[in-house]
Amino acid sequence: MKRIYKTVAVATADAGAGFTVLLDSRPVGSPGQRPIILPGRVLADAIAAEWDGQGETIDVYSMPMMGFAATVIDRVAPQRDYVVGEVAGYGGSDLLCYLADDPPVLTARQETAWSPLRGWAEATFGARLLPTVGVMPVAQSPDSLAALRRTVEAVNDWELAALHTLTAITGSLVLGLAVLHDRLDAEAAYTVSEIDEAYQVERWGTDREAEQRRRIRRAEVAEAAKFVELLRAG
């Protein structure tokens, strides 16, 4: 898409609640043609900077904060219950509950990193998650799953978009919530999620495509955490 605007600015929304990004005095809309009213000035400034930093051709992949905002407007808000259910559903098959059955050194690494986080989830949200070894599914208690769903339901639409990304990429609702609640930063959460992959790289090395996929996933986790940071900055 070619850049056809010259100026970028931030303005208070017409109703006085929130902010809009203006391209040549016209408010930016979502891909679904919905108005984007941003809840805070810091986030609005960051999105404006993304638009202002475009060259002759607009690269949507270089605007992650705009992407999250559009996701909130077009996907999260219109179908919030579905998104809540999708995110909460990870609690029943959380990565942190599935330990490798071999070799013992990998199992030990996982449990050293994962056990404290499962304990944190129990202490913070009342969700006691049972671990297992191997790939056979372990049934989590209905009370724990209900507690996790209540936790996700309490998240506003804006942070829910980030939580969805954090959870889907790491395979762990606990890790997503750990970032959202400042228990882990983005880099630590990603590292904890890929203990198995890191071990395999130690043993066998990696190839260019696999390493590129890891870089992309790591960047997406960092972007989701940054979106939350900007939201909370006011």
Image (tube, helix red, strand yellow):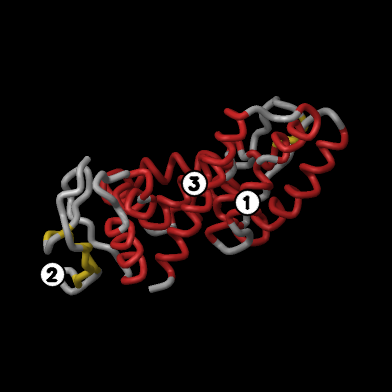
Query: Residue type at mark 3?
Result: Glu
Q: Quadrant of the N terminus?
A: top left
Query: Residue type at mark 2?
Result: Asp
The residue located at (28%, 56%) in the rendering is 51
Secondary-structure class at tag 3: helix
The residue furthest right is: 104
Bin the neighbour count of mark 3 within 10 Å (Cα to Cα): few under 14, some 14-19, many 20 and up.
some
Secondary-structure class at tag 2: loop
Q: Nearer the viewer, residue 149 or 104?
A: 104
The residue located at (18%, 63%) in the rendering is 7
In this picture, is 209 found above or below 233? above
Bin the neighbour count of mark 1 within 10 Å (Cα to Cα): few under 14, some 14-19, many 20 and up.
many
Cα distance between the residues tagged 1 and 3 = 12 Å
Of labels 2 and 3, the one closer to you: 3
Residue placed under numbered mark 2 in the picture: 14
Bin the neighbour count of mark 2 within 10 Å (Cα to Cα): few under 14, some 14-19, many 20 and up.
few
Cα distance between the residues tagged 2 and 3 = 32 Å
Q: Quadrant of residue 181?
A: bottom right
Residue placed under numbered mark 1 in the picture: 189
Residue 74 placement, left or right of 200: left
Q: Earlier in the sequence, mark 2 or mark 1?
A: 2
In this picture, is 136 found above or below 163? above
Residue placed under numbered mark 3 in the picture: 220
The residue furthest front is: 56
In this picture, is 43 found above or below 51? below
